Image (tube, helix red, strand yellow):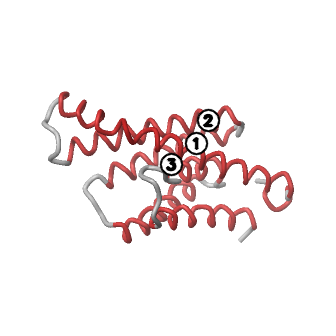
Amino acid sequence: MTPRLLTLLAIIALCALYRVMPHPWNVSPVAAMALFAGAHFQTRAMALLVPLAAMALSDLVLGLHPTLPFVYGALLLTVMLGFWVGKDINPGRVLAGSLSGSLLFFFVTNAAVWLVGNYYPPGLEGLNQSLAAGVPFFQYTLVGDLAFNALFFGAFYALEKHFPQQYSH
């Protein structure tokens, strides 16, 4: 294993660990982990599978729920956003990927609560209620995604600059 791969795996493992520790609601490294994995793993299979494995292991500790397939689907779509970011990693792409991932996760997971939960009535009215109920939490998702993306991409960029032989593609 190269230092680059070990570092990538360590970042993903720390994200899984963070999920099971007490933290503010919706301030989580999950979407940042997915975006980062998509941008940095050398194979798409690793980029897709490693974050899913981290989520699955932490979900075994946190508990399973009916919206998990939607959460994992949103995670996989965010990894795919990371493929785009990885084509030319720069602050603008990381910001666009982070904001897109936050919005994607918000819409997918709140729609999932409406679809599989018994909390909201069927139809557009229920979907709107579910989305509206998620709005107060979105600010925390956004802050967490932006902060963790800045941390992951910034730290890895610094490693690439200081240790180019160990961290270059």
Q: Observer-nearest residue: 47 or 137?
A: 137
Residue 92 at what x, y percent from top left?
67, 32
Residue closest to the eye, 85 or 99: 99
- Residue name at image x 53 percent, y 42 percent: 143
Q: CA distance from mark 3 to mark 2?
A: 13 Å
Q: Reading the chain from its start, which is encountered first: label 1 or label 2?
A: 2
Residue at which label 2 appears: 95
Counting from the top left corner in percent of width and height, residue 114 is at: 22, 41
Circles 1 and 2: CB atoms closer than 8 Å: yes
Which class describes the residues within 10 Å of circle 2: few (<14), some (14-19), or many (20+)?
some
The residue at which mark 3 appears reads as 31
- Closer to the observer: label 1 or label 3? 1
Name the quadrant of the N terminus.
bottom right
Q: In front: mark 1 or mark 2?
A: 1
Q: Amino acid at mark 3?
A: Ala
* Front-most of residues 69 and 17: 17
Label 1 sits on what residue type?
Leu
Which residue is label 1 attached to?
146
